[in-house]
């Protein structure tokens, strides 16, 4: 019996609840609140479209909400509602005056993720970071699934910013199960619960169109471990930000597990946990009496960044999985959709979809996989981050750069700073069909066509998945 779930439900039966955001991300939350017998639920959303009004009407008909407040000024009456609990969608800033006014009057600000984690009865693994968190999260879940295969008492649940909302399954999760979560900075900003094991893959400037500054973004990432003193922390020793975070933790008396392809063999001073590093085409994990080695050639995922993702995953669940589990997963896991996903080959030219690459650092990692002669499609929505760092990788690896979207000029300027003679050909396009056609015409045998936008998708798509699927459809339509 899940006592934490029962206690949470008992409180909801007496509460008036506001749900901020009526989109897909909160649909499972609304159903949970109804099944829990919540006293009253009112939804708020800044949009006021025909589709959203129809959805709100349907939610009311199903008894999921009592009322919906839509459109401009949607939060103006929030504090007057005398709500006991306010659930906000991840992208809504918690410091909006209307929200703070309601909190000052006694409302508890929370989220679907915080609610789930506070009720979860089993061991939780959580992964965040600017890059690689989805792949690392998936690797953790696959390692645990491999280890617990055949065990009827342990099921692995995957959720958070990946998969389906786990709050819909909270009643089915047992104490002997394992939960693996991918968490974004938006989900972490107000989180007051930490997992048993936390991983930060790296931290680089990201989402500065939502976060007020880089420090707030870093602080949000650190909340993943901050609420549980005994949370085991896995950090990237090759990233300056996470290295500093880890050293502060060690100074505070906490242990840290380190990974980095750059780490050499070294001793383990007090405060250090295990270490994972890469040397001479081998992956090593050492420390605290545990040793593991894996030849790089036995790993299916391409790229050194994925070597680091595997290292992080092994450190995260190394207390439970075996070396054989690691070997089998490394040899069989080929990656997640939209992450260096091979779409097809045409006349000897491979076409890769890496639509997930929404920052310059992601595109740098993607380009590192290839020796050169890349026909790169890049550009998208500008989220207020610098692009200077991408210039050297573009100059070194790219043959033809096809640009589309608001960040096109920033990306071209970064390239030209490293390629003043114009060796790399630059083409500007207005649409994705035009961009894919240009790539098709530019590529010759021995080249590689890569979609790696280095920008978010929201200038013309709902999300990076839609962008990647459009690219794949266009590539599949090209003549062979």
Image (spheres, rainbow, N blue to C red):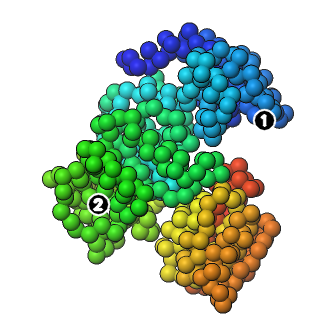
Q: Name the residue tied to disc 2.
A: 276
- Disc sitting over residue 172 in the figure: none
Q: Secondary structure at mark 2?
A: strand
In the image, what residue occupies the spot 58% across and 61% down? 359
Q: Name the residue tied to disc 1.
A: 47
Tell me where residue 312 sits by quadrant.
Answer: bottom left
Q: Is residue 300 above or below residue 83?
A: below
Drawn side of residue 356 relative to residue 461, left or right: left
In the image, what residue occupies the spot 51% across and 77% down? 370
Drawn side of residue 135 relative to residue 344, left or right: left
Drawn side of residue 140 relative to residue 185, left or right: left
Q: Is residue 232 above or below residue 453?
A: above
Q: Is residue 344 above or below residue 337?
A: below
Considering every residue shown, the one lying at the far top of the view is: 14
Q: Position of residue 473 (x, y in %)?
A: 70, 61
In the image, what residue occupies the spot 38% across and 17% down? 3
Quadrant containing the N terminus is top left
Q: Position of residue 387 (x, y in %)?
A: 61, 68
Assess disc 2: are there few (<14), some (14-19) or many (≥20) residues with their C-alpha within 10 Å of its C-alpha: many
Mark earlier in primary sequence (2, 1): 1
Tell me where residue 4 sits by quadrant.
Answer: top left
Q: Is residue 184 above or below residue 87?
A: below
């Amino acid at each position: 019996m899940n006592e934490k779930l029962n206690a949470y439900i008992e409180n909801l039966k007496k509460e008036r609840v506001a749900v901020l955001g009526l989109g897909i991300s909160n649909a499972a939350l609304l159903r949970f609140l109804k099944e829990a017998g919540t006293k009253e639920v009112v939804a708020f959303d800044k949009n006021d479209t025909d589709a959203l009004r129809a959805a709100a009407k349907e939610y009311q008909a199903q008894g999921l909400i009592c009322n919906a407040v839509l459109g401009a000024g949607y939060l103006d009456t929030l504090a007057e509602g005398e709500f006991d609990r306010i659930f906000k969608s991840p992208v809504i800033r918690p410091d909006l005056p209307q929200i703070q006014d309601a909190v000052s009057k006694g409302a508890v600000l929370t989220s679907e993720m915080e609610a789930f984690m506070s009720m979860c009865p089993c061991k939780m693994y959580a992964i965040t970071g600017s890059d690689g968190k989805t792949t690392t999260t998936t690797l953790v879940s696959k390692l645990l699934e491999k280890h617990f295969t055949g065990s009827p008492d342990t099921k692995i649940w995957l959720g958070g910013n990946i998969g389906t909302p786990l709050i819909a399954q909270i009643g089915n999760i047992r104490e002997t199960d394992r939960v693996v979560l991918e968490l974004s900075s938006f989900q972490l900003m107000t989180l007051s619960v930490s997992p048993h094991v936390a991983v930060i893959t790296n931290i680089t400037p990201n989402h500065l169109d939502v976060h007020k500054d880089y420090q707030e973004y870093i602080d949000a990432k650190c909340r993943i471990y901050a609420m549980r003193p005994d949370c085991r922390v896995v950090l990237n020793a090759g990233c300056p930000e996470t290295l500093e975070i880890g050293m502060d933790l060690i100074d505070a008396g906490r242990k840290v597990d380190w990974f980095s392809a750059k780490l050499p063999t070294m001793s383990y001073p007090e405060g250090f946990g295990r270490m994972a590093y890469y040397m001479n085409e081998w992956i090593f994990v050492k420390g605290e009496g545990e040793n593991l080695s894996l030849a790089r050639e036995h790993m299916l995922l391409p790229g050194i960044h994925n070597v680091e993702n595997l290292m992080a995953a092994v450190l995260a669940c190394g207390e439970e999985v075996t070396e054989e589990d690691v070997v089998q997963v490394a040899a069989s896991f080929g990656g997640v959709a939209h992450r260096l996903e091979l779409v097809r080959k045409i006349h000897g030219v491979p076409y890769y979809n890496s639509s997930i690459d929404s920052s310059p650092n992601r595109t740098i990692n993607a380009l590192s996989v290839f020796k050169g002669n890349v026909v790169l499609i890049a550009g998208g929505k500008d989220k207020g981050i610098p692009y200077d760092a991408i210039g050297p990788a573009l100059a070194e690896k790219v043959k033809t750069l096809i640009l589309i979207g608001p960040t096109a000029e920033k990306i071209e300027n970064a390239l030209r700073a490293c390629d003043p003679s114009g060796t790399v050909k630059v083409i500007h396009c207005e649409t994705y069909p035009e961009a894919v056609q240009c790539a098709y015409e530019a590529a010759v045998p021995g080249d590689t066509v890569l979609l790696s936008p280095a920008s978010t998708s929201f200038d013309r798509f709902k999300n990076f998945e839609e962008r990647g699927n459009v690219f794949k459809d266009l590539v599949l339509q090209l003549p062979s």
